[in-house]
Image (cartoon, rainbow, N blue to C red):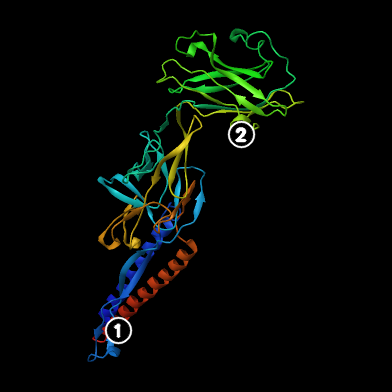
Amino acid sequence: MSLMSSMYTGVSGLESNSADLTTIGDNIANANTIGFKAGRASFEDALAQNIIGGAGSSQQGWGARVQAIQKLVTQGALTNTGLATDLAIQGGGFFVVKGNHNGSDGTFYTRAGQFTVDKNGALVNLEGLTVQGYQADATGAITGQMGDLKVGDATSPPSATAGITVRANLDPNSPVLTAPFDPLNAATTSNFSNSTTVYDSLGNAHQVSIYYRKTATGWDWHALTDGGGLTGGTAGTPTEIAGGTMTFDTSGKLTASTQTGTFNPINARNPQTLTFNLGDPTGGGGTGVAGITQYGNQPSATTFLSQDGYSSGQLARISIDAKGVVTGTFTNGQSRALGQVALADFSAPDQLERLGGNLYGQVPGSGDAVVGKPAAGGLGSIASGALEQSNVDLATEFVRMIAAQRGYQANSKTITTADQLLNELIALKR
């Protein structure tokens, strides 16, 4: 090998170590970039030449060159943020986002889960690319093909009250009332009352009060609501919508109960039949103690009162579980699944093309994207309220930087030494 070749061999070392320093600098610059995967420069020796015959022991190399800049797709540490739409992947896979990036429409992949809900209700990244997932129907069932995941424009439709459940005790020492029950003077013509709010099919609320009246043979009960909310009713006038009787045995157990009446709200789709669940009478094979009782030495008191209807509701907040299922909680207290985040993985994820903006693109070397649901099929699980930090280890990068710097210096010395020898050779002619 000539002295000139020695100089070019040194130059190859400078170029290789310079590329290594560039990669290290890129890693350090992205030490705080969410979801960033560190790179590593790998070198190979350059083509050798045979200087004597063809024996392998008589070959000389021509230096080094960069073989590849590898992506190290190891797991980054997770940092809690408390924001439900901040997502991190624990394990393999990438979030799938779709939209326009740098003037090109397409599908992209990322580990950076800094998401938010845009004005159209779609889950998007900070660039406005839409997160892909599986949409849920109105019942919360997740079906269909992968597409834009919309979670912010959901509402909860109303549900008409079908049943009212009462658990209470009626004081057997209450006086028997001889005057008939008067809805206009319900408090004075009854012994005890309780109330709840029920809902019609349009989600309108109606206050229902139940009045209990001691008789010679048992108890009567009357359910009243304001007539202004009823078909044919008068505002401000209490109107009976249901009533019945109850009898008890000497131990205070409910033996029988009856019920009549229909609830017909204004503008509702259909009249409603409200079922008043007052207990399980012994006469029907029940225990007689699951609802209303008449235990002695105990005052009249309500222990439980509920109904199964609710009004319409707006989305109040969302939560996302480990399987990527987005659940919405509504202002009416209801909740249901809104959709599920999709993940994609590749046979060679380290070969994905960096596109900037924390995005990667599929290339032939990476293999085709295999899309699925989190925590299934080898894909990682989702951590909501957390972000995956860069996997750059600064201590390792500084050690590599020192090694690259020394390598650069050593190759510089090769060039200066070859230059000195060339000067000596030129001086021989003088």
24 in relation to 143, above or below: below
Mark 1 or 2: the one toward you = 2
Amino acid marked by disc 1: Glu
On the rendered image, what quadrant is the C terminus found in? Answer: bottom left
The residue under label 2 is: 286
Does residue 422 appear to the left or right of 117 in the view shown?
Answer: left
Tell me the residue at 69%/24% (across/down).
301
In-front residue for pair 367/67? 367
Q: Secondary structure at mark 1?
A: helix
227 in relation to 168, above or below: above
Q: Position of residue 354 (x, y in %)?
A: 32, 56
Amino acid marked by disc 2: Gly
In-front residue for pair 3/331? 331
In-front residue for pair 39/427? 39
Residue 430 visible in the current orientation: no
**CA distance separating discs 1 and 2:** 115 Å
Figure quadrant of residue 142: top left
Tell me the residue at 27%/63% (across/down).
365
Residue 320: mark: none
10 Å neighbourhood of mark 1: few (<14), some, or many (≥20)?
Answer: few
Figure quadrant of residue 86: top left
In-front residue for pair 260/210? 260
408 in relation to 312, above or below: below
Tell me the residue at 48%/14% (across/down).
229
Residue 105 visible in the current orientation: yes
Q: Are the two marked residues, 1 and 2, in contact with CB atoms closer than 8 angstroms? A: no
10 Å neighbourhood of mark 2: few (<14), some, or many (≥20)?
Answer: some
Q: Position of residue 375 (x, y in %)?
A: 43, 54
Please count the marks in the image. 2
The residue under label 1 is: 424
Tell me the residue at 46%/57% (across/down).
76
Q: Position of residue 376 (x, y in %)?
A: 41, 55
